[in-house]
Amino acid sequence: MASLNVGNLGEYLREQRRNAQLSLRQLADAAGVSNPYLSQIERGLRKPSAEVLQQVAKALRISAETLYVRAGILDAERDLNEVETRAVILADPTLDERQKQVLLQIYESFRKENGFGAENAVDGGARTENDSENDSATGPRRTAG
């Protein structure tokens, strides 16, 4: 079987599984997928659906968005900073689940306040670090109100 362009995803999944100290079989059981299918994903031979990635992410207790970017489902350039921030929050072992959700809600409210809400993801409102640095010289944008 020819290798698809999902090797990066497979390598990342294998690393996360090993960090979680799970065998391939244990992760497959926890995610509700077959052991051979998960093995093929890790080896870059299969491209999983968003639903399978979500199940695997939940079993690993990591951000599904991170897996979506690595699988090419989300646009990496546009979404990577947000995804990484969310992943760091979700992976923090010192926070409980409620605290993580509250932090994510606060983070999203600040993003929306600064014009980076979900609506910008649809219309291509991606920005780079340089854009943010340039804005800091002119001060915060305000909306009429």
Image (spheres, rainbow, N blue to C red):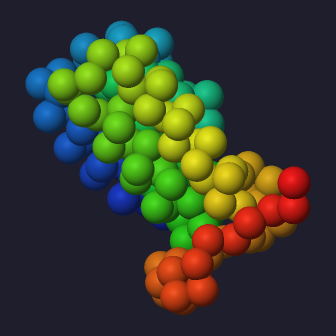
In the drawing, does residue 76 fall left or right of residue 96? right
Q: How many marks?
A: 0
Q: Is residue 139 left or right of residue 133?
A: right
Which of the 4 image quadrants contains residue 20?
top left
Task: Point out residue 70 in the picture as x, y percentages from the top left corner.
Answer: 46, 55
Q: Residue, x 25% and y 14% (percent of image)?
A: 26
Residue at the spot 25% in from the left edge and 33% down from the top edge = 92
Q: Nearer the viewer, residue 10 or 126?
A: 126
Q: Is residue 99 above or below residue 121?
A: above
Residue 87, given in percent of the width and then of the height, sits at 38, 42
The answer to which of 92 and 17 lies nearer the viewer is 92
Q: Nearer the viewer, residue 47 or 22?
A: 22
Q: Image quarter for residue 38?
A: top left
Is residue 84 visible in the rendered image? The answer is yes
- Extreme residue in the right direction: 145
Which corner quadrant holds the C terminus? bottom right
Residue at point 58% right, 78% down? 139
